[in-house]
Image: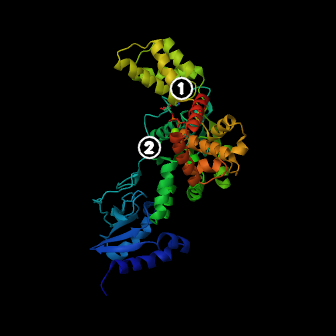
């Protein structure tokens, strides 16, 4: 009988089976497919890179012994990882990964093929390597602790972050959940933790990912039938940083898979860092069991920076950019921009740009102009609720009437106007506008918008309503 990959592998398996527990055999050896035998090199296909690592770590001796028995002292083992393409495109392809020489199999007589596959690995997180598969951290080194200004508003979160970075997985801050409004430094702090860990523990695998990207990868993995690979991949990480977990809300499949990954990491003493725009108690449409995990460690809030911190942040950025700005200008900005750090930076950038393009000095009057624009543009967003209130009041009815099922003409018109302004002045979808204005469907909202457009063109009185309402709504914001 000719020797084939299958026959060699079958013999290896029967030897391996005798030497390990049935459960381990089932988990780690049954899924392997022998794919090629060339000379004394046997190629086996494994389901994921995690799998490959596991084999190398735990079963390499066994594999070696069995292979040498079958193919002699010069035996070689080549892994093919049946791998997903970034979990994001459809074609599954194969990458060859040479059996690592971490355990010097050479001494035992098995030569390690050192050639690397010419085919590129398409997973953006993975760089092919001989020693160990490396995962790109996706960290931004310019977000570090050194340039994260400390203040009362962020002291707890910052110190917790440093504690975690010093001892990832080894503090009770696991997970560490950093929460707070937009532009307050969640992403910056999350990166800083990762960057610091990479610096202190270069051998640890750190991964930063936004929850949106995580969700997309998961969806793709389901589409491509690589869900297990996806899970294995994430279970390999030592420090997993997931930014903006609020985006997981309502996505039960992703939550479910994240729950399993989380448990695996947590049980194995790996560190999880999360950020969110809300405290766990205020998160909506997140499964209870996941929420309760979020609360296991520490939830630390980032608050709006106080005046002194705002001044320090501004000064720090100016220093970094080598820009000199009069103290009263800095003070003016810090006094008037009190919402978040991103806006502070925005004003600073505009001011520097204005001054340099127009060859102006950093005067208070220029600063005032720019700050004014910012403050106006960032006034609170108009909500559908507010639109309904303004429109009802204008037509002298209450919101319940506006939302009611009645077909009376003036009420229908008021309702349509509320829908029309909601579409124009908020970012809400037609469906969500409909559901908030008397539980109508998206087609009704679309129809309302068209009707208002038509009437505005043809009906003078109606046009007056629209103009006046527009003014009222604008003055609200
Ligand atoms: P979030 O993720 O909470 O929306 P970011 O982390 O993106 O906010 O922060 C917005 C900007 O403000 C970033 O450029 C960040 O570097 C900066 N920033 C936030 N907090 C601080 C701080 N304490 N010190 C220095 N820069 C900060
Ligand atoms: Mg962010």
Neighbour class for label 2 at 10 Å: few (<14), some, many (≥20)?
few
- Which of pointers 1 and 2 indicates the residue nearer the eye? 1
Work out which residue is located at the far bottom of the displayed protein and give it. 1
Residue at horizontal 68 percent and vertical 54 percent from the top = 288
Where is the N terminus found, in terms of image quarters?
bottom left
* Secondary structure of residue under mark 2: loop
Residue at 32% from the left image edge and 63% from the top image edge? 112
Instruction: Find residue 202 and name its label.
Output: 2
For residue 376, the mark is 1
Q: Position of residue 282 (x, y in %)?
A: 67, 44
Task: Indicate the position of residue 103 as horizontal and vertical percent values.
Answer: 39, 59
Q: Nearer the viewer, residue 39 or 224?
A: 224
Residue at 58% of width from left, 24% of height from top?
338
Q: For the residue labelled by badge 1, is the local secondary structure a helix, a strand or a loop?
A: helix
Q: Position of residue 24 (x, y in %)?
A: 53, 70
Q: Is residue 388 above or below residue 215?
A: above
Q: Quadrant of the C terminus?
A: top right
Left or right side of 452 for 10:
left
Position above or below: 295 against 471? below
Instruction: Out of 335 and 241, give the one closest to the viewer.
Output: 335
Instruction: Find the distance from the CA under tag 1 to the CA under tag 2.
Output: 46 Å
**In this view of the protein, which residue sits in the foreground, 151 or 20?**
151
């Amino acid at each position: 009988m000719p020797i084939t990959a299958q026959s060699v592998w079958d013999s290896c398996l029967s030897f391996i089976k005798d030497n390990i527990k049935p459960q381990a055999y089932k988990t780690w050896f049954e899924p392997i497919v022998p794919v090629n035998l060339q000379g004394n090199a046997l190629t086996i296909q494994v389901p994921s890179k995690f799998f490959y690592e596991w084999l190398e770590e735990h079963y390499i001796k066994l594999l070696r012994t069995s292979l040498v028995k079958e193919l002699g002292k010069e035996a070689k083992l080549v892994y093919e990882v049946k791998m997903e393409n970034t979990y994001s495109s459809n074609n599954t392809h194969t990458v060859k990964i040479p059996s690592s020489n971490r355990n010097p199999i050479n001494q035992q007589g098995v030569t390690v093929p050192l050639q690397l596959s010419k085919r590129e690995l398409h997973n953006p997180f993975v760089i092919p390597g001989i020693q160990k598969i490396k995962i790109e951290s996706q960290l931004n080194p310019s977000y570090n602790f050194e340039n994260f200004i400390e203040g009362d508003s962020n002291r707890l979160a910052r110190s917790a972050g440093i504690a975690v970075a010093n001892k990832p997985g080894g503090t009770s801050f696991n997970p560490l959940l950093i929460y707070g409004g937009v532009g307050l430094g969640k992403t910056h702090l999350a990166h800083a933790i990762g960057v610091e860990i990479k610096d202190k523990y270069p051998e640890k695998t750190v991964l930063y990912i936004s929850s949106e990207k995580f969700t997309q990868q998961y969806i793709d993995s389901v589409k491509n039938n690589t869900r297990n690979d996806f899970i294995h991949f994430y279970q390999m990480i030592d420090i997993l940083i997931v930014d903006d977990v609020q985006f997981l809300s309502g996505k039960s499949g992703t939550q479910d898979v994240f729950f399993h990954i989380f448990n695996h990491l947590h049980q194995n003493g790996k560190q999880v860092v999360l950020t969110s725009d809300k405290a766990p108690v205020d998160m909506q449409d997140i499964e209870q069991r996941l929420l309760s995990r979020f609360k296991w460690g520490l939830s630390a809030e980032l608050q709006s920076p106080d005046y002194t911190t705002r001044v320090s942040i501004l000064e720090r950025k100016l220093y970094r950019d080598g820009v000199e700005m009069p103290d009263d200008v800095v003070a003016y900005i810090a006094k008037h921009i009190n919402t978040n750090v991103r806006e502070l930076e925005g004003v600073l950038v505009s001011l520097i740009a204005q001054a340099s393009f127009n060859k102006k000095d950093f005067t208070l009057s220029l600063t005032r102009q720019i700050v004014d624009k910012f403050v106006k543009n960032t006034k609170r967003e108009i909500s559908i609720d507010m639109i309904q209130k303004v429109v009802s009041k204008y037509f002298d009815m209450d919101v319940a009437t506006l939302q009611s099922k009645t077909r009376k003409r003036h009420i229908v018109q008021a309702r349509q106007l509320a829908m029309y302004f909601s579409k124009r002045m908020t970012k809400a979808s037609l469906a969500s506008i409909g559901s908030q204005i008397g539980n109508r469907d998206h087609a009704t909202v679309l129809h309302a918008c068209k009707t208002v457009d038509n009437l505005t063109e043809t009906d003078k009185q109606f046009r007056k309503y629209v103009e006046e309402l527009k003014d009222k709504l604008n003055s609200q914001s």
